[in-house]
Image (tube, rainbow, N blue to C red):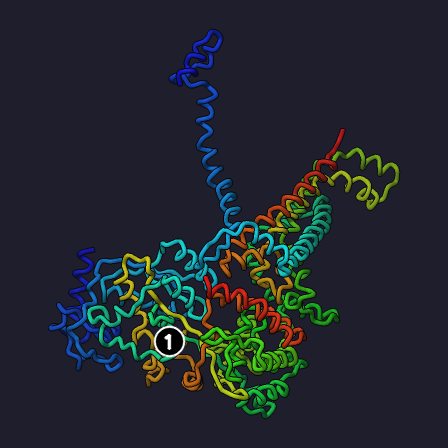
Amino acid sequence: MATRSVSRRDFLRIAATAGAGLAALPLLANCTPTPAEAPKAAPPTAAPAQAPAPSKPAAFDWQRFKGEKIEVTFTMGNMVDVLMKYHKEFEDLTGITVGAEQVPEQQARQKQVMEFNAGATSFDVCHYSYHVHKRLFAKNKWTVDLREYLNDPTMTPPDFDWDDFSGGAKAYATDSEGRICSIPIKIDFWMLYWNKELFEAKGVAYPKTFDEMLEAAKKLHDPAKNVVGFLARGLKNANVPVWTHLMQGWGVDPIDAKGNFYTESPEAIEAAKLYQSLLKNYSSPGVSGFNWNECQSAFALGQAAMWQDGIGFATPLEDKTKSKIFGKVGYGVFPKGPKAQHSAMFGDGIGVSSYSKKKGPAYYYCLWATNKVNQLRVLQAGAAVPPRSSALSNPDRAQGSTMPGEYFECLEGSGKILRAGLPEIIPVTEFRDIFGIALTNIIGGADPAAELKKATADFKPIYEKSEKG
Amino acid sequence: MRPLLSKARAPGRAAVLRHGGYSRRQVYLLFLLPALLVIFAVIIFPWLFTIWMSLNDWQIGMQQSFIGFANFQKLATDTRFLETIPRTLFFTVLGVVAPLIFGVFAAEVFHQHFPLRGLLRGIYIMPMMTTPVAIALIFIMMYHPQLGVLNYLLSLIGIPPQLWIYDKNTVIPALVLVETWQWTPLVMLIVLGGLAALPTEPYESALIDGASRWDMFRFITLPLVTPFLMVAVIIRTIDALKSFDIIFVMTQGGPGTASETINIYLYLQAFAFFNIGHASAVVIVFFVIILTLAIILLAARERLRWTQ
């Protein structure tokens, strides 16, 4: 171990002296060097243009926790693949060894809750969804409040730049008491995928409003040619964000921050009626059993004119081997509703377990995973949308990317109209389950007002109990 | 200790004296202790704990409180839970009957002598050895209303496309079809074993009397293999009642709650909503249902046993 760390240090020293090592390790260039190495490190002017020059190069000690080992639990996804590919960089930079696992989404959620509830976690760092677990984690203080670390210059390098994260992402990471429970690592914007070829064939323009969207779905729906006008999730639970996103077009959330319910309001009913019209009349038969993957398959085969979902599902559409509509995909900012235009936002964060005995090294990992370089890498790989503004506005954002320019334009446009896609409540899974069943019934022809009324009556006691508990 | 020793020293009791005054029976009991401890740890304690949890309002991340039988009372009025019971039974009946019919037919076929019989038997039992999740994923693709191969095959013979698992009216039969495909070989193996054990005399007599193949099957084979069929019915009933993986992967209980069986409901309560107390009450009710069905089936099997 000692031999290994010395040789690493030697390598870094030589690299810094030569002014070339940093170019080979872009992450190092992005971070300030250790105090011991600072005088010998390359001056800020020698840093590659890609990484911002540190303001106080000598101030930060990345090797403070050298020799420690941490465990990270991730929810499976492309973004995690990108990060794990560069773990060696983190280990070289800090001397901390990382053990990481990827767990499928549903199992990851169970694992984390069970372990936190047991009062002992097998991981030091956890990656979790804000739209599912933010309130539960915050209520039980399962992750460390990072404010103290973020404000401590010996723990956070100056170039980390907390203010580089978008306002929505920072709000997502902050609980009602002002605690910063994690660092945002990715966000997902909802938008509208559209098949340019099908639109052009029928001379239809990209819809700018909900009315135009419905009209376009009607015109493009052609069952004889095995083409549907509109696709979105119909499967219970998965379908709720489709409805809440539509509801945002009326400027309403299902439950506001004060706990007021709008789930059976006229706006909610109108959104449910639009959902019903689109999916019952102009969608795939059996759409009530479709999750995002069924929608993605049908859209990639050119069997749907429009598909409403998260932009995080775009990558396979631009893969020649998987997509029949390669090069024909349009990425549209979601049309305007009768009262507002929004893109539903969902997000994930990375936090330090309150039960970890290695909080410092774990925090260092969070810093590294969400730094500017990694966030740009994730964007360039088309693996996720980073919450950092610098990554989204970076002129190199399309460098090496398979995604077309329109994809990035859609990201930028959607980023301006973000609104949380699900209410920030503890029983969000029950909310999705109960209203998901109502929406499935609505696709089947049930009365939207009656279904939403029943679902609200079923859900309210669960919500009230969660707020008391 | 003292009284035991003095009793052991009494005339005629010398044989039970062993190991510092402990009786042979007491020493034997000591050997049972490890097994008893394991049984307590893996069977008795989990059951006692489940019963305890079912008497509590216990949701992970929330405060826990003792509520007596309130979880059971809630279940009795929970329409969503109550709907899962007939749905589970419907799924179970179909999931037992269909493999039974096809399994008996397959056993009859494989009981005959024909070339490559051994190889074909081996191929026939392969679905049984396949991972349920893999089977479920393949059937999802086959059932896709627009892209699935099943609708394509139906179109070749002029049948309109079906919605399979994507419609609340067809989802249970479509799921049973998957179960049938996977578990018919098991029934076939059990019945095949039974057929091999049948005496040949009744068939010879029937042939002399001019009985047809159907008559021989109806009046000789079927009554004689019934005890074996009962074994298959018991195994399949318990399996179908417990079925989870295929349903969860293929529909997650949907569309809506159209394929939500007790197991799926239980899973949602325990591992999606983390409602541990409520889920424990469901476990106990479910256990009672399985136990009742098992007792009925075992009693039926006793009645159908071969007698001299």
Q: Chain of mark 1?
A: A
Seen from the viewer's position, the closer of residues A441 and A254 is A254
Seen from the viewer's position, the closer of residues B303 and A119 is A119
The spot of residue A11 in percent (x, y) is 18, 66
Residue at 68% across, 45% down: B233
The spot of residue A359 in percent (x, y) is 28, 61
A136 left or right of B136?
A: left
Residue at 48% across, 21% down: B25
Q: Does residue A373 sit above or below A115 in this rendering?
A: below
A286 left or right of A205?
A: right
The spot of residue B196 in percent (x, y) is 70, 38
Seen from the viewer's position, the closer of residues B171 and A201 is B171
- Amino acid type for the residue under numbered disc 1: Ala
Q: Does residue B95 sit above or below A447 in this rendering?
A: above
Kindly tell me whether residue A419 is visible in this rendering.
yes
The spot of residue A61 in percent (x, y) is 18, 68
Can you say which quadrant of the picture contains the N terminus of chain B?
top left
Q: Does residue B50 sit above or below A299 in this rendering?
A: above
Quadrant of residue A380 in the image? bottom left
Residue at 24% across, 82% down: A49
Give SS at disc 1: helix
Can you say which quadrant of the picture contains the C terminus of chain B?
top right
Residue lying furthest left in this view? Answer: A39
Q: Does residue B49 sit above or below B265 in this rendering?
A: above
Quadrant of residue B178 in the image? bottom right
Residue lying furthest right in this view? Answer: B209
Kindly tell me whether residue A328 is visible in this rendering.
no
Q: Which residue is mark 1?
A: A171
Residue lying furthest top in this view? Answer: B11
* Structural crowding at the residue carrying mark 1, measured as other residues with C-alpha within 10 Å and reported as few (<14), some (14–19) or many (≥20): some
